[in-house]
Image: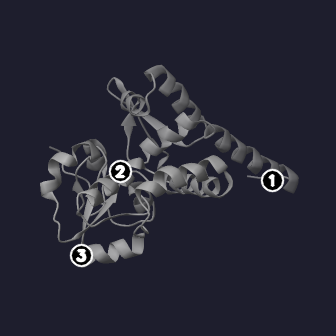
Amino acid sequence: MRREAVSSRTAAGAVRQALAEVAKALSHEHRIALIEQLAQGPRSVEVLADRVGLSVANASQHLQQLRRAGLVSAQRDGKRVVYRLADDAEAAIVGLLSGLRSVAGHTVAAVQRVAGAYFGARDDMEPVAAPALLARLRDGSVVLLDVRPEDEYGLGHLPGAVNIPLRHLDQRLSELPRGREIVAYCRGPWCVLSFEAVAALRARGFQARRFDQGFPEWKAAGLPIEIAAAG
């Protein structure tokens, strides 16, 4: 079958147009929040709407825009519609969000102010990077604490992580050892849950640091994960 000739100008224009469509799909904070939720695992529209604080109808509209850009896919499960990140692009989408965070952190004054006033105030210690964390998990020198909600932990978590959602942390401190360092993580590098958890643990005398990324970045890097057995 003969292929139709395409000029270099036409090809470059088509690529730029596709890039613009992806950028447009991510040009709303609610759609970024939906992507962040789906990076934890598949979700129904109803759960996504609840987590992001939207009506089901509004969440559905945003998800349709993400779907048209090829960022998410949908599958019917009985009466529910379950969304997930595009299977063949999950790692790339997580990487795209990481790139956006990095650019915003360097160029957007509001992000720099928030990073200093909120995040910096709660955690001024250098976080633990993935290679160091992996080595320390292998030698058993840290306790890994997942502070996400139970259902997100169930969809996948770092190996050996203990799940204590942030809202339950005060009531379950007795489950954590005081003689070992605790490394907390949640949904991503700017997820407030891990910052709050580390601040609370240090205030109570625990040795605590953050993982500098989150579950999606760990998974996207091809590092080992575990999935909780169904109850």
Asked whether disc 2 touches disc 1, contact meaning CB atoms under 8 Å apart, the reply is no
Residue type, label 2: Glu
Say which element carries label 3. Answer: loop
Query: How far across and how far down the image is residue 165, in percent?
Result: 26, 46
Is tag 2's residue or tag 3's residue first in the polypeptide sequence? 3
Q: CA distance from mark 3 to mark 1?
A: 51 Å
- Residue 133 is drawn in which quadrant? bottom left
Nearer to us: label 2 or label 3? 2
Q: CA distance from mark 2 to mark 1?
A: 45 Å
Is tag 2's residue or tag 1's residue first in the polypeptide sequence? 1
- Label annotation for residue 12: 1
Q: Is residue 155 above or below residue 211?
A: above
Q: Classify residue 130 as left or right of residue 1.
A: left
Residue at (43, 28) in percent of width and height: 53
Query: How far across and how far down the image is residue 17, in percent?
Result: 75, 44
Query: How far across and how far down the image is residue 79, in percent?
Result: 34, 23
- Residue that badge 3 annotates: 141
Nearer to us: label 3 or label 1? 3
